[in-house]
Image (tube, helix red, strand yellow):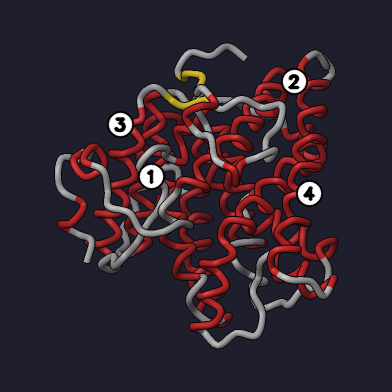
Amino acid sequence: MEYLYSRLVDPSEYLDGDLEGLFDGISVRQHKQTNHEIVGTLRAQQDWAKHVNRLNGYHGGLGDSYNIMATCIPECLPDRLEIISYANEFAFLHDDIIDNVDRTQGDQQNDELLATFLKGAKDDSLEFSGQGIELIQMQMLREMATIDRERAITTVRAWSKFIENGSGRQHHVAFETLESYLPYRIRDVGEMFWYGMMTFGLAITIPEAEDATCKRLVRPAFAALCLTNDLFSWEKEHQSAIERGLGYVPNAIGVLMKEHSISIAEAKALCRRAIKESVSEYVNIAKQSTGNTSLSPDLRRYLDALRYTLSGNAVWTVYSPRYGPPVQSSDVQVNGAGEPARDFMG
């Protein structure tokens, strides 16, 4: 891959014991124009506060050192970084709703979200009106279509599959083994959502004939992503489960503890081992795919770019206030959208 929009991050900048071995064989890259992400993220928060609900103690994709989109899709085209950052923040905001309601309410929220996306995928004009979350969705789709209509529609269809099959649909299921949990978690972590983000952000089109091949090749990458998320979000999700009175936590750490009758520390060690194995497998897949001319150029580019999602996600997660201790927003984040975050953060 040719690197036009990102810089190589020196390992000394993210040295952290928690990251040891979690993305061996992959470097970390960061988009050079992170201001686009800051603007898009804060704009999504402002729109949510205006049209849905005020935000209290909320943390999304921005961090003091690393922002999620700049590290996970470092070669995103600059003119697309703001809108995919907006979309990702919207997903975080909606995810926080799903994580804190019961199954019936969660399914209703997802069904409403899905209906709007399906409507957007079918309506060429994208001009129908709505309110609340629907209004934000349609505004987002119109912005994307203005940049690249064809890929915007492809992205919306991918997101619709994610909402239909993932997005917390099985958070109520107490999985007995990691083997049974992983297929669900891969869907729930947003395999199709991320596919839509990357294909739009990188302006690539993977032929439908390669859908099954693509899904097979990227499985270890998404296994690593969901396990990394579970490893570092355990404390947050465990606390949420306690507050909601749940007897289980939809997280790999809890599944491993139950499956093997082990402690949290032992489950985290097993989870780390599984992450390393999945990353190693995917690094080999990506390397072998580089020169495989039986694959389309855009599929090969997608497979290569996904490596940086693995390393970028790990670094962002460790430094992220979303999963770590609360931190004050940095001046550049607060002022990045032209007005203070405190105007809409309760």
On-image quarter of the N terminus: top right
Q: As displayed, is residue 173 above or below residue 305?
A: below
Identify residue for label 1: 63
Q: Given the image, on which type of amino acid does mark 3 rest?
A: Asn
The answer to whether residue 83 is left or right of residue 25 is left
Q: Nearer the viewer, residue 214 or 327?
A: 327
| Residue on which disc 3 sits | 35
User: In the picture, residue 277 is in which quadrant?
Assistant: top right
Give the CA distance from mark 2 to mark 4. 32 Å
Q: Which mark is residue 273?
A: 4
Q: Mark 1 or mark 3, which is nearer to you? A: 1
Mark 1–mark 2 Cα distance, whole angstroms, equals 35 Å
Position of the C terminus, as image quadrant, is bottom left
Question: Disc 2 on helix, strand or loop?
Answer: loop
* Mark 1 neighbour density, 10 Å: few (under 14) some (14–19) many (20 or more): many
Q: Earlier in the sequence, mark 4 or mark 3?
A: 3
Q: Are marks 2 and 3 in contact (CB under 8 Å)?
A: no
Q: Earlier in the sequence, mark 1 or mark 3?
A: 3
The residue drawn where x is 50% and y is 23% is 9
Query: Distance of mark 2 from mark 3, alpha carbons?
Result: 33 Å
Q: CA distance from mark 1 to mark 4?
A: 27 Å
Labels 1 & 3 near each other (Cβ < 8 A): no
Q: Nearer the viewer, residue 252 or 132?
A: 252
Residue that label 2 marks: 296
Q: 230 and 16: which one is in front?
A: 16
Tell me the amino acid under the disc marked 2.
Answer: Ser
Residue 150 on image: x %, y %: 52, 32
Residue 12, above or below 153: above
243 up-or-down from 134: above or below = below
